[in-house]
Amino acid sequence: DAGVIQSPRHEVTEMGQEVTLRCKPISGHDYLFWYRQTMMRGLELLIYFNNNVPIDDSGMPEDRFSAKMPNASFSTLKIQPSEPRDSAVYFCASSARGKETQYFGPGTRLLVL
Amino acid sequence: LAKTTQPISMDSYEGQEVNITCSHNNIATNDYITWYQQFPSQGPRFIIQGYKTKVTNEVASLFIPADRKSSTLSLPRVSLSDTAVYYCLVGLLRGSTLGRLYFGRGTQLTVWP
């Protein structure tokens, strides 16, 4: 298995632009997680899905952030409009049903100018 | 909801045993304790997981006292390549639903030659 795949690996955009991050979880995993990591706040859970259904989005910072999982093999995290304070590394992770071990992707490094 | 507290940083020398303690005073009955390791520019990687007493694998040991209000990750004979951030995670399982997960702030372990 290729592991969790994220794209793009790096994204540089200007304030106000829409940003879409993509994730392909490990095949057969029922859970998908989106995290954000910054120096100031560490690793924060934004939202997670179970069988494509959002379970807990209380970590999503504000309405500018949205996440979808249209099928078991694809998820997106969208920021619209983006702001400089959104600059961070965004990780996607997946895990199998009933197992707590999460497998993380390589992350997307986002810089909003 | 169980949150965790761990030291911000630790230093060690090659060949020494390192013990990193995580406090989780509000851990619930069904919570598991999981430790992850993160190298720069990479996503966190699973190290070990346990529920009570002691768990050992080829990489580390995890000690959990009877009250489960803390846990200690033990790395035997560390090397320079063990320099990384270590996260303590307490997770709640409720049947088929994975409850809210909390990463600790992470402990930066630096191993010196």
Image (cartoon, coloured by chain):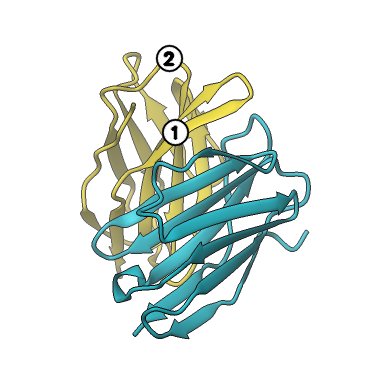
Chain colours: A cyan, B yellow
Point out the image quarter for the N terminus of chain A: bottom right
Name the residue beneath numbered marker 1. B100
Q: Residue B29: which disc?
A: 2
* Residue B106 visible in the shown view: yes
Q: Is residue B62 left or right of residue B72?
A: right
Q: Please tell me how crowded label 1 is: few (under 14), some (14-19), or many (20+) other residues with Cα within 10 Å.
A: some
Q: Quadrant of residue A31?
A: top right
Residue B81 on image: x %, y %: 43, 66
Q: Amino acid at mark 2?
A: Thr
Say what secondary structure mark 2 lies in.
loop
Q: Quadrant of residue A5?
A: bottom right
- Mark 2 or mark 1: whose residue is earlier in sequence: 2
Query: Mark 2 and mark 1, same subunit?
Result: yes
Amino acid type of disc 1?
Answer: Arg
Count of marks overlaid on the render: 2
Q: B91 above or below B14?
A: above
**Residue at image location 36% in from the left, 54% down from the top:** A62
